[in-house]
Image (spheres, helix red, strand yellow):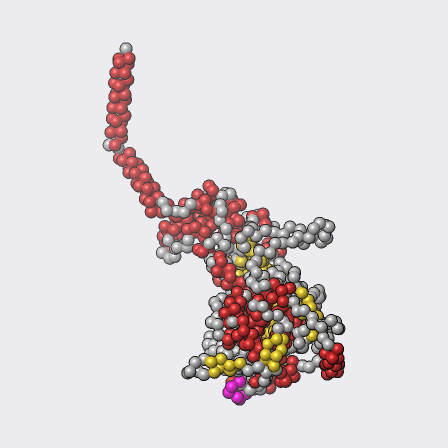
Amino acid sequence: MADGTISNVKLRLKRDFGELGGFFARLWHRRWFRILGGLALLGLLMIIALWLFVARDLPSVDKLRSYEPPLPTNVRSADGTPIHSYARERRVQLSYPEYPKQLVNAFLSAEDKTFFSHHGVDIPGIVSAVINNLTSGGRPVGASTITQQVAKNLVVGNEVSYVRKLREAILAWRIEDTLTKEQILELYLNSIELGRNAGGVEAASHAYFGKELDQLTLPQMAYLAILPKGPANYAPERYEARALERRNWVLGQMLENGFITRAEHDSATAAPLGTIPRQTPRYERVGGYFIEEVRRQLLDKFGENSETGPYSVYQGGLWVRTSLDPRLQKFAQKALRDGLLRYDRGRGWSGSLVPKPLDISRGWLQPFLNTNIGVDYEDWRAAVAIERQGNSWEIGFDDGSTGTLPRSAATMPVRGKGGEAFAAIEPGDIIVVAPNGGSYALRSIPRVSGGMVVEDPRTGRVLAMQGGFDSRIQSFNRATQAQRQPGSTIKPIVYAAAMEQGLNPASIVVDGPFCVWQGAGLGNKCFRNFGNQRGAGPKTLRWGVEQSRNLMTIQVANQIGMDHVVDLIQRIGVSRQKYPPYLSYALGAGETTVLRMVNAYSILVNHGRALNPTLIDFVQNRRGQVIWPENWSACNGCNAPDWNGGPMPRPVARTRQVIDPISAYQIVHITEGVIQRGTATVLRDLGRPLMGKTGTTNGPTDVWFVGGAPQMIAGLYLGYDSPTNLGGYAQGGSIAAPIFKQFAVPAFEGMEVLPFTAPRGTRMIRVDRGSGRPVTAGWPSNEPLASVIWEAFKPAVEPRRQRRTLEEEKRAEQAKQVEKKAAPQAEGPRDSDFLQREGGIY
């Protein structure tokens, strides 16, 4: 029965298929069926070809869900104030709700009025564009929707071809299936390029109107909406009439689409463009050398663009909190600049700021702007010499304005050549001028330069940095890049090594002749004190540091062994590599930077604990997450206005001990004497505990000062980039220390007066300042030349007071009375007087 049923089914199927085949056979003989079949096959082949050659390798639109537009890196100072932005284009990312409704309507009217009704592709618009392209034979154009523009800008690319348009349309269709209309508009308004290096409408609002986006008026919003078609075509400084016409067309479209009323339309079309001149953010010149050093470090850590990682400097949208104190930076910048100008004064005009005149035959403004040269010292301005007109020069400025430089205001001689500066100026020269009545007067940028660094010795944070006169004129950062001989500023490191090897501040060393046999070919090398001053005989180590005696320093280095000296110089960070154990390195013959010297002194003040000088406190990504340094954690409650009465936190010191803490303090205590009665007495009247050391290199080619208070150490040098003799009168105490003083007077204002603290185990003993012997008669006073002072000793080498005879007591008392009468009653001896009399810096 079952077999019969199956047989019947097979017969029925055979009959049905036979009838169906006959039906198609009859249809195939009909012409219209063959045409339809051919068209269907052609369509299938076209779909396959479209997939193979156009759509197969299209990128996934899923990445648009997590798309992040390139954003600049924003830099803040220590107090959170924005001070700079590393950007090749300005961009601020907003979410869709943050865009004003009328702004969205303006862009829809200008670019895609059916945006909310189509599915990514405007079919009627595309058909019209294809017909136009086939008939015109020109550059292909199309009715791209906003979705298609997002596909083109972010995924497909900007190739001009029909294949690209097909890829763009397919991808736009997929985007509409993946994202909401609001998400698409957010991507579009954040990513479009609108000229003036502005990416996105928020950045464009600042670039063209100097306003936040929500502060724009209706006509200003309409102006931004015309820019996607070609920002250069509607640049207000060149094509104002064209821009007004196109803006008013957008306003007309908004009226037609019902987005605005007739009254709003008429009022808006009557308004001017209202754009501002092109300008850069004002904060870009704050701490130029500091900011550039931060940029270098960020580039090393994160890379330049998105190809190097998600947190790149120019596209990653980083937020960088630096240690820069704008107040201290201002003081350091002014102090160093004023010091350079004081030294350079009277040496004549230093010449044009460019090696050869600019080509201004086709206009002067753009070539001038391309140099990016500027000056922000007081009221000085950089200008380009345009044309000489009799006894005056016409000069131009970076804002497009012009002025006059009369001969009477440019009479200084040309340095190294003679003659009058006015006659030496050529068209295209970039010069520096300052307002002088209704005209301008010529100024000279000093050729001598230098660097200055300010550091917190408790943390290693760099608070200020100045690497020359102006970073826009001299980009080379002399605070971190210039390798200079430190001169006598190295001596505290030498004596610190001596303290580690068992000497103490009261140890007696002979300040006398010292020669080294260098072999038969070279003979004896004899060292000398500054100014060829003869030795003073047996003296304490303290006296040797305070008076900066070369011969004593060499004696000490030779006694303890130069291996120990150069080892400490490397350990404390003055040099990355270990110097050869030559005695000349004990007098500052090696090379280092200002930053390294300041950090070395900070380590001494920090009780010998290692410090890593840092300019960056932390780095956040665009979402506010801290990504560097690793394992960073916030200090909750650190900014609490009131103490809750609980135990004060005591953070664990995790840094290595570079030098014995008591040895470090002994040097700090000794170098306080440099301020009180040594080579830096010009700083004595600052009225607070200070340590420091001056330095003058052989020549002299560089003059130095490094030192400061427990809360702040600063260091600087002054010298020519190509080492040149500064003149026999140039000394660290007379040139560098006054620069520090100019900085310190305002910098210390309001700062708590604190002493340098001694580490645990330090024994403070009353000693005779001249002999270093412990005493019981008399107490230390605040007088700089007091005969009795406190001296710091280690317990193992604490000096024991010896009983003196009655006759010895009388002689000691008589010596004190003579010294007291000899001491000045008013102003103490000046640093220059001491140097002429005693010598003492190398």
Say which residue appears at 62% left-offset and 85% top-offset.
836
Pick the quarter of the image with the N terminus.
Answer: top left
Q: Is residue 390 among what the camera can see?
A: no
Image position, residue 204 (x, y; %): 55, 58
Q: Vertically, is 33 above or below 179?
A: above
Image position, residue 770 (x, y; %): 67, 77
Image position, residue 414 (x, y; %): 53, 85
Q: Quadrant of residue 510?
A: bottom right
Q: Quadrant of residue 783?
A: bottom right
Image position, residue 595 (x, y; %): 55, 68
Q: Vertically, is 116 above or below 654?
A: above
Q: Which residues are magenta?
A: 415-420
Asked if the stretch drawn in magenta spans residue 418, the answer is yes
Q: Vertically, is 633 above or below 831?
A: above
Asked if the stretch drawn in magenta spans residue 498, the answer is no
Say which residue appears at 75% left-offset and 73% top-offset.
778
Q: Nearer the viewer, residue 80 or 480?
A: 480
Q: Is residue 582 among what the camera can see?
A: yes
Q: Is residue 625 left or right of residue 358?
A: right
Say which residue appears at 71% left-offset and 73% top-offset.
803
The secondary structure that most of the magenta stretch takes on is loop
Q: Vertically, is 20 above or below 792?
A: above
